[in-house]
Amino acid sequence: MTPILRLDDVHLRRGAREILRGVSFEIPRGELVAVMGPSGSGKTTILRAIAGLEAFQAGRVAIDDVLLAAGDADAATLRRLRRKIGVVFQFHCLFEHVSALENVWLAPVHAHGVRRDEAQRRAHELLKAFGVDHRAAALPRELSGGEAQRVAIARALAVDPPVLLMDEPTAALDPERRAELGALLRDLVGQGRTLLIVTHDEDFASTFATRLLRLSDGRLS
Amino acid sequence: MLVLGALADAASGQQGAPFRWAGDAEGGAPFVEADPSHPDTVVGFDVDIANLLARGLGRVPRFIEIRFDSIDQSIGRGDAEIGLSGIEDTPARRAALSPTIPYYVFREVLAVRTADAGRFRTLADLRGRKVATLGNTIAHDILLRGQRDSGIQVVPYEDDLHPYSDLVIGRVDAVLLDHVLAERRQRFVAGFTIQPATVAVGHYVGLLASTRAALRDACNDILRAAMRDGSLERIFRKWGVWNDDQPKLYAQLLAGETVAPVVVNGGTAINDTNPEAPGGTATLSRWAAVRLYLPSLLRASIITIVLSCASMALAVAIGILIATGNVYGGRVLRLALTAYVELIRGTPILLQLFVLYYGIAAAIRLPAFAAALLGLALNYAAYESEIYRAALEAVSTGQLEAARTLGFSERQVLTLIRGPQAFRLALAPMTNDFVALLKDSSLVSVLTVMELTKQTQIFATNLGSWVVPGALCAALYLAMSLPVSAVARRLERRWKAPTA
């Protein structure tokens, strides 16, 4: 089975500092892979490189049929890449000036040309599926940490990407919410999505991930 | 002279104290100007008259520089004992202050472009045309009557050079001012002709506070003595402004006749300088004054509000472009935009307005209102751009990256995510700037735009008091600025309020 996500010998440097020193791995469709490692080991940088937020100096990233080469990517490649991935940031990074619902439908309408009523209907569905539809009209600053995370996941899934990247999803959750999140992520995998999460939460990773990658000092061990 | 001196001492009671007299050296020769060879001393016929009076009073003259249009208020306050700076005798001044007897008679004359000398001979020929003059002068009042009676468009200036330079380049069609000013400008500005007909006759006086009647009488005695013994004639001959009108005035005064402050052509004496107040404004009750002035102040407020709104709108548009260029642009563009912002912020707005209206007039001749609008807009754009830049940079990078991973283009990130949030952040400082702009719009009166503060100043001068016009003016500015603040506060509250 061809992997949906594949990294080949990715090197990423910021100034003189080498953050990733030749990272390679591949993930088949429908897996939940957790990248573990101490702070500063380069975990988040892997996600940024895959999402095209930071250029890398050597190696390549392949997501489905989109190939991201070293150096600055062109706009067309980035556009194709971003139909394949959804990203949930550690601090959610919801758009502060619009409601939870609009956070979810904004990208489908403006970036992907979905009709507004269709996008809004789908946004409600997603919020309902994650148990936060009653907060649809709330602004991000009025949401709790757990609610904001669910809205962020809904937003990332609104354009239906096959791969979901998540940065430290359990960082702000109490144990009960962590278990709920784990169940939710398993459901997503059950629907055929591929998840790559970065975490230093050993319990969570070993409980829910189908595979663990360990990163230290910019290299997988 | 000895007797006079003793009289003066008794009158002033200030033997030994310097004789403080006020004038505006910016008014220039032959009245008062900085001595070209000793710029810290002043020369001019008003300086010689001040010296003459001081000598007669047995005191040492001391010059105090005061802006021409503030001399009345300054004398009223007691900043100086007497004002001498080509100050015109008017009924309002006679009512509010205590002028000396006139020491010089002048003629109001019409200046036109040499090419128009045949068709614009009198004010009556200038129906619908723009006629320039100095604000707060008899000439200005005559033109305001002309505006009412024969549809002249009055363009008031704050100095007496630019009316003539603007006449020559065609911004105005005629200038009405006294012959001393007209003849002086004719020596430096080519291309205009002074019409021989006299439009009106007026007089220069020394101006004292009404509480200084004794000092005024002493000054009058000294002036009469100087008329008799030829000292005044020597002074005016020295400055090249002596003519046959003066001996007639002196003969009248020495014979004890009273002299009407202003006589318009045909022999009518004007007993009030305010064209809208037949009874003379100084005797009006405060309520009557409010009723009289409110319509013109409201008209001036409309100019202020239209000018402020239009220039703010333009400033916001240019400010957004500059800020966007500064945040997204390349190095060269950023450098150029920063240079613009620093140049504008680092130089006075008054200078910018002057350059825009007068400085570049040879190349681009902007109408006064357009120059005012553009000047304010270009100035405020620099400040707005800094607000927007800071606001754009205050939107978290996380949100911008999230937007990019969702597939938004950079333009969409700006218009859908970054811009709207920056606008909310910028609203409070923008409101602040708009209120500041409302008030800064008063500066454009230097470009002859008659806005609220200028109109107030004219009324205050006519009334001889700042109390009622000042209060009205303040009330109108507040009426304009308070709603703006209220709307801004409501918007801020709405964007902050929980919606769920």
Image (cartoon, helix red, strand yellow):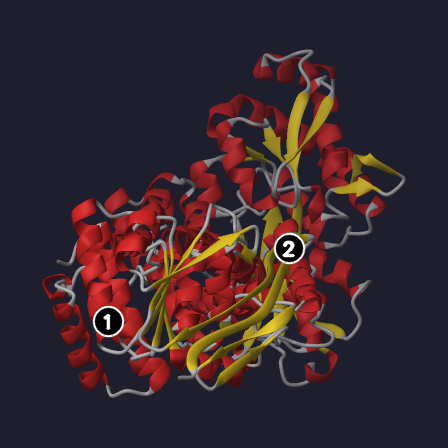
User: Is A221 left, or right, of A22 in this rendering?
Assistant: left
- Mark number, residue A142: none
Identify which residue, B415 or B125, lies in the foreground: B415
User: Is B5 left, or right, of B425 in this rendering?
Assistant: right
Please state which amino acid type lies under the numbered disc 2. Glu
Please state which amino acid type lies under the numbered disc 1. Leu
Badge 2, how many Cα within 10 Å: few under 14, some, many 20+? Answer: some
Say above or below: A22 vs B130: above
Say above or below: A51 vs B436: below
What is the chain identity of the residue bearing mark 2?
Answer: A
The residue singled out by tag 2 in the image is: A18
- Mark number, residue A188: 1
Measured as percent of width and height from the top left, residue B257 is found at 55, 42
From where the camera sits, is residue B303 visible? no
Which residue does the image show at 70% across and 60% down from the upper left?
Answer: B161
Measured as percent of width and height from the top left, residue B154 is found at 51, 68
Measured as percent of width and height from the top left, residue B448 is found at 55, 63
Which residue does the image show at 28% across and 52% down from the upper left?
Answer: A204
* Quadrant containing the N terminus of chain B in the rendered view: top right
Identify which residue, B57 or B41, lies in the foreground: B41
Q: Secondary structure at mark 1?
A: helix
* Quadrant containing the C terminus of chain B in the rendered view: bottom left
